[in-house]
Amino acid sequence: MKIYKSNEIKNIALLGSKGSGKTTLAESMIYECGVIKRRGTIEAGNTVSDYFPVEKEYGYSVFSTVFNAEFNGKKLNIIDCPGSDDFVGNAYTALGVCDMGLILVDSEYGVEVGTQNIFRTTAELKKPVIFALNQMDGEKADFENVMEQMRDNFGPRVVQIQYPLESGPNFHSMIDVLLMKKYEWGPDGGVPTISEIPEEEMEKARELNQALVEAAAENDETLMEKFFEQGSLTEDEMREGIRKGLVDRSIYPVVVLSAAKDMGVRRLMEFLGNVCPFVTDMPAPVDITGEEVKPLAEGPVSVFFFKTSVEPHIGEVSYFKVMSGTLKAGMDLDNVNRGSKERLAQIFTICGQLRTPIDALEAGDIGAAVKLKDVRTGNTLDEKGCEYQFDFIKYPAPKYVRAIKPLNESDSEKLSGILTRMHEEDPTWMVEQSKELKQTLVKGQGEFHLRTLKWRIENNEKLPVEFQEQRIPYRETITKAARADYRHKKQSGGSGQFGEVHLIIEPYTEGMPEPDTYKFGNQEFKLNVRDKQEIPLEWGGKLVVYNCIVGGAIDARFIPAIVKGLMDRMEQGPLTGSYARDVRVMIYDGKMHPVDSNEISFRLAGRNAFSQAFRQANPKILEPIYDVEVLTPGDTMGDVMSDLQGRRAIIMGMSSENGIEKLSAKIPLKEMASYSTSLSSITGGRSSFSMSFSGYELVPSDVQEKLLKEYAATQTEE
């Protein structure tokens, strides 16, 4: 294969909602380039993109697929991303290493929530966008309606390059207003017949061509002057203007096609090759120090690894982008993340599961290596003397959590290793060993996302596992002051154990006055503070401890032991065993024995006195509350609202944006366990949501009673 120069390479992320036809388009693109002789189908399970067993099992894309297309002397590296919101991490990865996004829109359904989410992501990352209206031959395809939605959602920057003479089942021809030609296909698509625009279409075509010329001229002062002088631009000038407009996102070109019938695909390839920005046209990426790294073939060699997959019969395949320099097969590089050396004995260009060895790849190009010794996703490899390091891919927060455990407890260590490897393949599969909940948690973007993980563990690794609901990280606190004392006394021959602690506890809030006088019943306690400890808790909130001992009732050397006893109960609250928070404790009296008193005695006395006081201080359970934002089509709004209200949600606000409704709510984490699945079911997969931690709030009294009974039952069983 030819070694392409940096200014001949274009990197494109293929994006779109689930069902918009990305895999089918990818198949048609590589067919048009001659990489394959016959197009596969999703139904037959023989496409170049969806080749993993789990993808064939479920019939939808799970992983992004890298492929390249050599067309008219240009190299297009294309990353086909899954459309399901559950696998959105692939889009973040692809846009991180690609220079632009090609967003497919299903002409039957128009602009969906998924389309808006993807567009929003490209805006965050400042990536150019081209829209392709696919499935123009669909039964319900309506070109004019979709274009109206496009303008409503994405504004006046949406500019037509093409329009169909007829949309729906009779789609077989279109007008290209950039080339001012008519394209027509036979029943099998493929190579079009190109002819002059019919007279009856000429007025419309000229009007759209003029709008395109104006949009192209806006992005270059020289072109603008020429346009004012002559009223038109040459084809090459228009392409240059569109390319500059793409780079600064001032133009969003729209093309039409039917990927399934291979109509418009060849013209799309020409457009991408002629108009898309080259690697060298885009702003240079920056390393972690903020230094710009230009894609220069003569620069120092630096390679960023953005994806890892484990493939049957091969093992680990590591995908990379050459950020700088010219990478040659057999080079020795330093892994700056792991402090190790790595030899890239062979490097490949990729087309799905097809890999072609190549001698070198220049800056900006994308390739792969197999069976590397010590390379992980996100690592940077540099030649000696180069110190670049990259970290530009940021992933969305997880939305679906399950506890996972092997059916056989002895396989726990094996499962841990598998999960670590799975996270390497898809960083949005996150794993947490929760000490608090005593569970291994796996986190993802939705039920399908984690179901896919389970399928792969059980079918590829032959390890049976089960999912359980995540335990909720409740918190315990108190709402009033209380007093208690406890004597720990134990005698079993020889020296015994003795410690007695008297204490007062109360709720802690920032800025509250120092303790002074307390009254319980007819008894008044006036405290003299000798010492104060503020202990910030890992799980949030504080424990504040005051030493108010007078007259040497307890020796100062036992105070740390009492504090340890208090922390024992803060780590395992008396109500449900959850973490306690925001309590202040005044140790004001006690007794000790000259022989039998020791640290363990006072630790146990402190712990038990605290437990007794805690239960008398009107204790409450706090639950984690999350801010949730739901995007849904207007016709599903009522059902979504009803479902949220059934989850104890407090609706904070509603707004409408281009036909998509946005709901903001605060919802207890307990009620979010199955929300991903429920929302998908209610709206037919047309909605999405995001969630972020808000804070802790008191649980309702009926919920608290239920939690107390459940915890008491577990303690009885134990």
Image: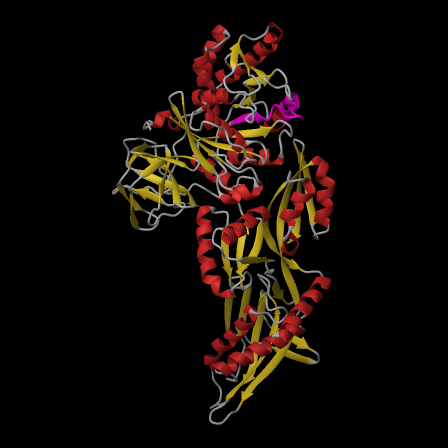
| Residue 564 horizontal side relative to residue 308, left or right | right
Residue 139 magenta-highlighted: yes
Question: Which colour scheme appears in the figure?
Answer: secondary structure
Q: Which residues are magenta?
A: 130-149
The answer to whether any part of residue 466 appears in the image is: yes
**Foreground residue among 555 and 365:** 365
Image coordinates for residue 336, horizontal then vertical, percent? 32, 47
The answer to whether any part of residue 664 appears in the image is: no
Residue at x-position 56% and y-position 8%: 197
Image coordinates for residue 117, horizontal then vertical, percent? 57, 36
Image coordinates for residue 287, horizontal then vertical, percent? 37, 40
Image coordinates for residue 199, horizontal then vertical, percent? 60, 5
Quadrant showing the C terminus: bottom right
Residue at x-position 55% and y-position 60%: 540
**Foreground residue among 401 and 282:** 401
Residue 575 vertical position relative to residue 465 in the rendered view, above or below = below
